[in-house]
Image (cartoon, grey):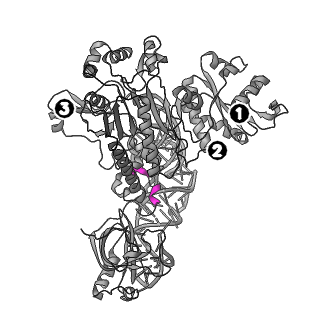
Amino acid sequence: MLKTHTCGELRAADAGKTVTLAGWVNRRRDHGGLIFLDLRDRFGITQVTVSDDAALEASNGAAASKNGQDRAQALETASQVRSEFVVQVNGAVQMRPEGFENPELETGEVEVIATGLSILNEARTPPFVISGNQADDVDEAVRLKYRYLDLRRPKLADNLRLRHEIVRFIRSFLYDRAFLEVETPILLKSTPEGARDFVVPSRIHPGRFYALPQSPQQMKQLLMIAGIERYFQIARCFRDEDLRADRQPEFTQLDLEMSFVEAPDIMALIEEMLIELSALVSDKPIQQVPFPVLSYQDAMDRYGIDRPDLRFGLELFDVTELVRNSKFGVFKNAAAAGGRIKGLRYPGGAALSRKETDDLIEYVRPYGAKGLAWIGITGKSDADGRFPPESLRSPIVKFFSAEEIDGIVCAAAAEEGDLILMVADDAGVTNPALANLRLEIGARANLIDTNLLAFCWVVDFPLLEYDSEEQRWEATHHPFTSARDEDWSILEASPGEVRAKAYDVVLNGWEIGGGSIRIHRSEQQMRMFQRLGLNESEVDEKFGHMLEAFQYGAPPHGGIAMGIERVVALYADAPSIREVMAFPKTATGVDLLMEAPSRVDDRQLAELHIAVREPKGD
RNA sequence: GGGGGCGUGGUGUAGCGGUUAGCAUGUCGGCCUGUCAAGCCGGAGGUCGCGGGUUCAAAUCCCGUCGCUCCCGCCA
């Protein structure tokens, strides 16, 4: 080894030892005859003191360097050293002089007095400063191009370390419970349902393609049929869809499947794992244990979204019935058209200026909401607890009767100083619009306790959703998800009413995992495919292997998949999953470091029997 | 596929119709024996993402384009 110790381990007890350290120069402080080098490696920072003055060592009683020339040489070298040079230091560990300790450093009680310093490699001036946190503000494109430098920064290195700890914990937790870790293929078959596949051409089979796994879903079910009973994998998954702060084209899942289980068994296992994990890697308390369980319907009604952030209240209210027959056309028409009129309370929002109030509509626009009705409560209630018209500021109160106003205020549980905000539209607009607005208000009014881990389960998802463009029913989760036992009977008659044996686990408003009990009987799976509008030959071509496998004694089974990056990002308080991936892609799916995707040469294409049709204008 | 934001020395930014394009940091040189974002002095470094247009005059206004980013759609 080129080092005897790391840069993070020397303490007062090591004083007097002769050591060799190696690492990167985090910073150099040149005082002329005395130069300090902060030497950094993965484990920490140690101050190296370089001087040609023998008194430095002698003064503390450590063995003086035998050769003063060594120290002079080291000083000369130190003056040439620059940030991020890779150096090796020989020297004596010494207590720092009284009053010169650095409490910011783990190694701050000691320093290494250099008797030898050699440059192992020089470094160009980096495009951004590695030490400190200045680089937090550097354009992410620069950071991604020089990712290997970005990862030297403690913040990013800490994220990788946290990820490692989390994955290590998950593995050991599952090993302890008799799970078998099995690797499944990366080269699979393209399946029609769901996300776009990344596709890989076959050289041996011209015109044929493999697909990269969107998840190992089918493989893990086949492993259950194979009798594995308890399987897991830290699995890389690929989806050729547009990116987001919480979505990358390739990502890692904890993929898990068990036989002879029901939904509560999987949920209990994962809940136990998350509770232990939280204690291990986070200082934040869990808001509620056991985790609250919300039905999908409940979540949509109260939060407008199936992954509610429960760190704060501000639940939505529904006044559809109350205003159905009001004189306010917008509400009346929306109700008549089968829509919902819902809203929420903005605590203290009555103090907002007219412009600020109007600006709130920008937060609901992207979801298709055409407007935002508002009532500010600026005055006091009367003796009966009602708010008379002069206590309200609103462009719409004139359309409502006193009873209707009272009903709205009551539904909103609004008080003096609050602002009531309402959206009237199709439920598919009202809910997401208000869910988004709720988050915005929660942030603005500082209602979100960022020191909480608010887990919850969302269950009873609809099994199917109607795709109006394709004019057919689609699986909400995936086509292998089982309906609840009592709902199988209405699969054909009322597909929209069928609830799935599915469960999502949500943390602070992020969906971190989802799973289900699967169909394990061939005839039920066939019914499901037919319900999805696949004819027999399609089913046979795409999923014949599954149907056949189910006929050889498939056990009841179910499982879950959890997004590792999302989990790590939440524990790391990172705004994007890119911050917890070693080499992420940009929002346009480009690897700025390797410059992928790239063209391949004609010979490669010829071998693959592929001709590229350039998009026009290229 | 659509919408919003951003793009000025290496980095972060100010300027937003006429400036020798300012500041900070980094960087380079000098001085300096106790610093830890070391200090002090001095220097170099940008033509304002790219292309076109408007104008006597463009970093600044307009159009297009590219890149990054957030969001909608999409994400079984």
Q: Residues within 10 Å of mark 3 (few under 14, many from 20)?
A: some
> Can you give x and y, in whole percent of width and height, for residue A219 in the image?
28, 31
The image position of residue A225, as x and y in percent, is 27, 27
Calculate the distance from the C-alpha at mark 2 to the C-alpha at mark 1.
Answer: 17 Å
Q: Pick the residue in front: A353 or A347.
A: A347
Residue A202, numbered circle: 3
Q: Nearer the viewer, residue A472 or A532?
A: A532
Q: Type of residue at label 3?
A: Ser
**Does residue A372 appear in this view?**
no
- Return the residue at label 2: A445
Label 2 Cα crowd, 10 Å radius (few <14 / some 14-19 / many 20+): few
Residue A473 in sight from this viewpoint: yes
Q: Which residue is mark 1?
A: A413
- Residue in the picture at 73% in, 35% down: A376
- Of circles 3 and 2, the one toward us is 2
Residue A609 is inside the magenta segment: no
Chain under callout 1: A
Discs 2/1, front: 1
* Quarter assignment of residue A532: top left
- Residue at 36% from the left image edge and 47% from the top image edge: A167
Real-space CA distance between mark 3 and mark 1, rounded to the nearest whole angstrom: 63 Å
Q: Residue furthest right?
A: A383
For residue B63, side relative to residue A193 (left or right)? right
From which residue to which does the magenta span run?
Answer: A131-143
Q: Chain of mark 3?
A: A
Characterize the magenta stretch by its predominant secondary structure: helix
